[in-house]
Amino acid sequence: MQIQSLDLPQRKERYCHVTWLAPYLAGERHCLFNLHQQVNHCTPGSSGVPGDWVTKHERLLQAVAQIHREEGRIVHLEQENTLRVRSRTGITVHGQCDVVVSETPDQPGIIADAKTGRPRGKDRAQVLTYMALAPHASALGGVHRPPMGELVYASDGRVEIAAAEAGPAFQKQLAELLQISAGPVPAASPSANECRFCRLAEICPHAVTESPTEDAVGWL
């Protein structure tokens, strides 16, 4: 497929939010053209989040924090947990952990994320990314060794993630994805399923707007 430009303004510096990476790391998105455009260009913003989501998320986040406080741990919330790190390829990776529990001499730190929706693979990938980056982010106080991870769902309980899951294999996968994002523009790999949720779809010449044709097979 011939690559066509979207004619978007170039960023002064390459930038990537952790939430952009998560669906690719989880195998839920495949169009690297989309990610490359977001990292290298100023793209249209999202339409924001519903007010009821903010309320539900805040309630769940506070409940998660309280559990750890009752265990005697030091807890940091949201804006206290903003991290910015730079990759070898010059991409500033930015994110904000919901809850960071400081490590102790005999207990690892914990990166926890509160989710109000149903479980998705990208949820785990998002927390794994925070876990991999946390020991290198000076803004995150209290996490200097590899932390554990925790996903807390409003309706499906709590999932613990071992520190080892964010080890060398995951770090290699993350680094390779960022290298692709800083390299030559990759070919688009559009699909009706991905394009339906892509915020670039309206301006992307590669976008697929119709579902696949249904064909009859006589021998089935």
Image: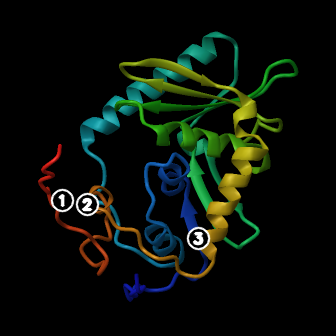
For disc 1, the neighbor class at 10 Å (few under 14, some 14 to 19, many from 20) is few
Type of amino acid at the residue the image marks with label 1: Ser
**Residue 5 at least partly seen:** yes
| Res 192 → quadrant | bottom left
- Spot the residue most to the front: 219
Mark 3 to mark 2 CA distance (whole Å): 23 Å
At x 70%, y 19%, the residue is: 73
Type of amino acid at the residue the image marks with label 3: Ser
Taking depth in this image into account, of 6 and 115 the one nearest to the observer is: 6
Q: Would you name the residue on which mark 1 appears?
A: 211
**Secondary element type, mark 1:** loop
Mark 3 to mark 1 CA distance (whole Å): 28 Å
Q: Would you name the residue on which mark 2 appears?
A: 192
Q: Would you name the residue on which mark 3 appears?
A: 181
**Residue 139 at least partly seen:** no
Q: Nearer the viewer, mark 3 or mark 1?
A: 1
- Labels 3 & 2 near each other (Cβ < 8 A): no
At x 78%, y 27%, the residue is: 103
Type of amino acid at the residue the image marks with label 2: Ala
Q: Is residue 105 left or right of residue 92?
A: right
For disc 3, the neighbor class at 10 Å (few under 14, some 14 to 19, many from 20) is many
**Secondary element type, mark 2:** helix
Task: Pinpoint residue 111: horizontal percent, then vertical percent.
Answer: 64, 33
Task: Pinpoint residue 23: horizontal percent, then vertical percent.
Answer: 47, 50
* Mark before the other along the chain sequence, 3 or 1: 3
At x 49%, y 57%, the residue is: 20
**Secondary element type, mark 3:** helix
